[in-house]
Image (spheres, coloured by chain):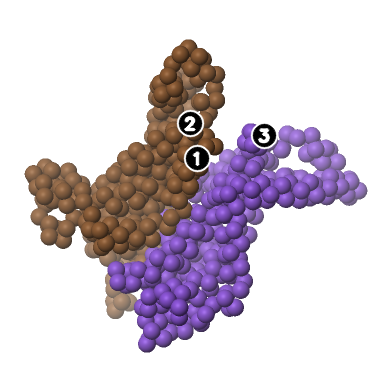
Chain colours: A purple, B brown
Amino acid sequence: MTDTSRARPAPRRRPRPGLIAARNILVYLAKAPTSAFGLLVLALLILAAVFAPLLATHDPYAQNLTTTLQPPGAAHFFGTDELGRDIYSRLLFGARITLTIIFLVTIVVGPIGLLVGTVAGYFGGRTDTVLMRVTDIFLSFPSLILSMAFVAALGPSLNNAIIAISLTAWPPIARLARAETMIFRQADYIAAARLQGASNARIIWRSIVPMCLPSVLIRLTLNMATVILTAAGLGFLGLGAQPPLPEWGAMIATGRRYMIDSWWLVTFPGLAILSVSLAFNLLGDGLRDALDPKQMTRR
Amino acid sequence: MSGGTWSWQRVAGQGGSVFVTLFGLLILTFVIGRIMPVDPVRAIVGEDATREVYEAAYLRLGLDKPMWQQFLFYLRDVATLDFGTSIRTGQPVLDDVKRVLPATIELATFAIVFGAGVGVPLGVLAAVHKDRWPDHLIRVFSLMGHSMPIFWTGMIGLLVFYAGLGWVGGSGRMSQFYIGLVPERTNFLLIDSALAGQWDVFCSAINHILLPASLLGYSSSAYITRMTRSFMLDQLNQEYITTARVKGLSRRQTIWRHAFGNIRVQLVTIVALAYGALLEGAVLIETVFAWPGFGQYLTSNLLIGDMNAVMTCVLIVGLIFITLNLISDLLYRIFDPRTR
């Protein structure tokens, strides 16, 4: 008992340098024009989602059959759809759905990937082989097609789409966490913790997981663009969020029938998806540069 | 001699791992098929079948047996290439797939030619001008392609180039006018129409494939550009490049003959992997362009819960992916003398 409590101070001291590093990275990202754009779009997305009821000019669900398919103008910034709903307001509330997807996928995929990866990397041998085989099987599918199959099995809905996306998004995270763990496993401080009698679970949780966390978070950011495109694709195919919900992909799907005469029905939701996924890609690109020591010294 | 046995061991090891992955793939499709909210018996006997008919079909499908036995039946069916009948089309799933797959291969091949044709030169250019404006411009261009929801890009493309400018054909593989005129031999429309000497159909098909294939190719060129750039940077930073320049070789020759010559093998593997990734975009773009291919077949069967067809499609996608991975690995080994 006393042995394990002695192992505690080491991981406790870590967060402070971590916070400083996080601030440095943020400053670095804000300086480069491309990643600064990414940060800006994400900030706007969060603002839009939080203040959607204040910013919206209309009720996103209110139908008005006298003003259907109105082109963009002063009354409706981005026009109205086939049921007379205000597209601008629907996009704002759609930002909430997008943020929900991002949040839920992150909190499901992060822990699963970390668990599988660290356990495989820490124990090695047969455990590693089995876990990595399972990972490989999931990786041998394009993520959209696998999530389509899962949604078909579970039934189409927003929640099931999120579950399906999470089921397909964890393998790269597990791979990464495993690779990191393999490096740390040999470190002296792990050996020290083991000699002090810490259990395997404790070593993984207190000493390895915190070390893997930064790179896992970065990888999650990088993958978020794919997650958003997959979610929108599922919504478009009718396998994600269901009609009355203002999900961007689903909005494009319903707008498709009126596309030739009313271009605004598909154009604006598409631009919204494009800018958010571009923002994540630019941010991920910047993060990669920020954390690549070769690049850092050169700038 | 010892090197030979060593590489045979590696081949055997890889064969084993492919086998395990395949087995896992079969388990995965089996599980997906089992948890689908469709009653497979009802799907066959219909809604108003009598109890006896239902029971008979239930027993014939082996649904009374334990799960592991059902899985063995599934393995047997797959081994004998019996994938069951599609509920929607009423035909064996394998026949359906044979009919729709060529359309997708045609589309994906055009797309990868476009993607590699644009992506590779851009990647080289970006590497040569690293951190200068061409590099930044190319980065934004390729990230753009990577970030676009392809189904949306497809619609905008149709709006602009078909409805607006009239440069390309609309949806489908050819004009409505020609449908049914071409004798089906290979189901590759371009090959069939050329064989039959129907050059007007051939032109119509080219006209229809250009837009979806170039959009699909654009989305895959992002990955190709990025990888080409980083491979090239690795080469350009090496000393032999400096040596070549010092010896008086021109910049162009150093870049293309020396540096690029060394990354060709890596590029082939990357393009093979990108080809597999195109399948994903194909599912979406086929829906937008009413392209009668594999992606559309999969989607429409998913939506009505056609279990046999969905399981088979997922299995085939997995197989294609595993095969492409294997091919890219093999190519790497054949072309790169260092891996021998």
Q: Residue at x 39, y 67 (%)?
A: A266
Q: Are marks 1 and 2 on the same chain?
A: yes
SS state under label 2: helix
Q: Chain of mark 3?
A: A
Residue type of the residue flagged with mark 3: Thr
Q: Is the residue marked by circle 3 packed among few (<14), some (14-19), or many (20+) residues within 10 Å?
A: few
Label at residue B128: 2
Depth order, front residue of B134/B316? B134
Q: Residues within 10 Å of mark 2 (few under 14, many from 20)?
A: some
Mark found first going from the N terminus, 1 or 2: 2
B97 to B117, vertically: above or below: below
Q: Amino acid at mark 1?
A: Trp
Residue on which disc 1 sits:
B133
- In percent of width and height, residue A46 lies at 60, 65
Instruction: Tell me: residue B39, above or below residue A19.
Output: below
Rounded to the nearest angstrom, the CA distance separating label 1 from label 2 is: 11 Å
Q: Position of residue B324 (x, y in %)?
A: 39, 39
